[in-house]
Image (cartoon, rainbow, N blue to C red):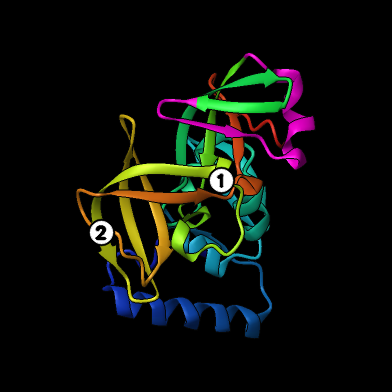
Amino acid sequence: FLFDEPLSNLDAKLRVQMRAEIVRLHHRLQSTVIYVTHDQVEAMTMGSKIVIQDSGKIMQAGKPIDVYDSPDNKFVAGFIGSPAMNFLEVRLVDEEDGLWAEGDGFRFPVPSTKAAKYAPHAGGKFFLGIRPEHLEDVDFVKEYDPKYIMKAKVELIEPLGSSVILQILLGQKMLVAQVDSHTGARVGEEIQLVADLENMHLFSTEYPHKSLDRA
């Protein structure tokens, strides 16, 4: 079966219902289904295997969770996930106390779990990718290393009920953080966030922006 964006003209509630119906139909028929969509939520929730294309070129294929956790390149990392992954320009600096990622308005130590993989690239410039859910309000993190605190200005607050989406300004770069629903963040004020760099990604600055984690 071939489905070519069958839900694109439906309203949000009906799209959710029809996604579930198509999945149930697939399980019942046990047939191969090719489903074309520009909606990454549909791809993640419906596919047993997904293929991400850019201008007709296959950028990555695999199980949805594998593509989400281990994107091959910057395009895939930015396409899969909502809100989308943040990207920061950094330089890797090798010092006596370890490897550091330095950028505009921040400086983080690279976790030991990542350092061995990144160390051969010290001195180079990269895109550091971190998902919004890996930036949390410091008030809701029980244990953390102060070196991973990010200070940023709150530009916009979007309450979702189960969480809050913050648009924050770090230096001259706008980022998105998904934090606890009880955050005390206020527009125009500074907030301290803990960056979970155990889940960071590094991508080449040259196209196709390959991931160092997948090298």
Q: Which residue is mark 2?
A: 157
Q: Which residue does the image show at 40% across and 82% down from the upper left?
A: 17
Does dot 1 land on a helix, a strand or a loop? helix
In the rendered image, residue 211, in percent from the top left (x then y), is placed at: 64, 33
User: Disc 2 versus disc 1: distance between alpha carbons?
Assistant: 25 Å
Q: Which residue does the image show at 62% across and 27% down from the upper left?
A: 100
Judged by depth in the image, the label closer to the viewer, 2 or 1, is: 1
In the rendered image, residue 140, in percent from the top left (x then y), is placed at: 48, 65
Range of magenta residues: 103-123
> Please, is residue 33 above or below residue 56 in the view?
below
Front one among 75 and 203: 203
> Please, is residue 193 above or below residue 98 in the view?
below
Q: Is residue 209 visible?
A: no
In the rendered image, residue 133, in percent from the top left (x then y), is placed at: 49, 57
Q: Which residue does the image show at 54% across and 19% down from the upper left?
A: 206
Check disc 2 and give the amino acid type: Ile
- Is 31 placed left or right of 108 in the picture? right
Does dot 2 land on a helix, a strand or a loop? strand
Q: Please give the label number shown on residue 45.
A: none
The quadrant of the rendering that contains the N terminus is: bottom right
Front one among 211 and 175: 175
The quadrant of the rendering that contains the C terminus is: top right
Q: Is residue 110 visible?
A: yes
Q: Residues within 10 Å of mark 1 (few under 14, many from 20)?
A: few
Q: Please give the label number shown on residue 146.
A: 1
> Please, is residue 92 above or below residue 201 in the view?
above
Is 144 covered by the magenta stretch?
A: no
In the rendered image, residue 97, in percent from the top left (x then y), is placed at: 72, 26
In the displayed orientation, state which residue is furthest to the left.
Answer: 188
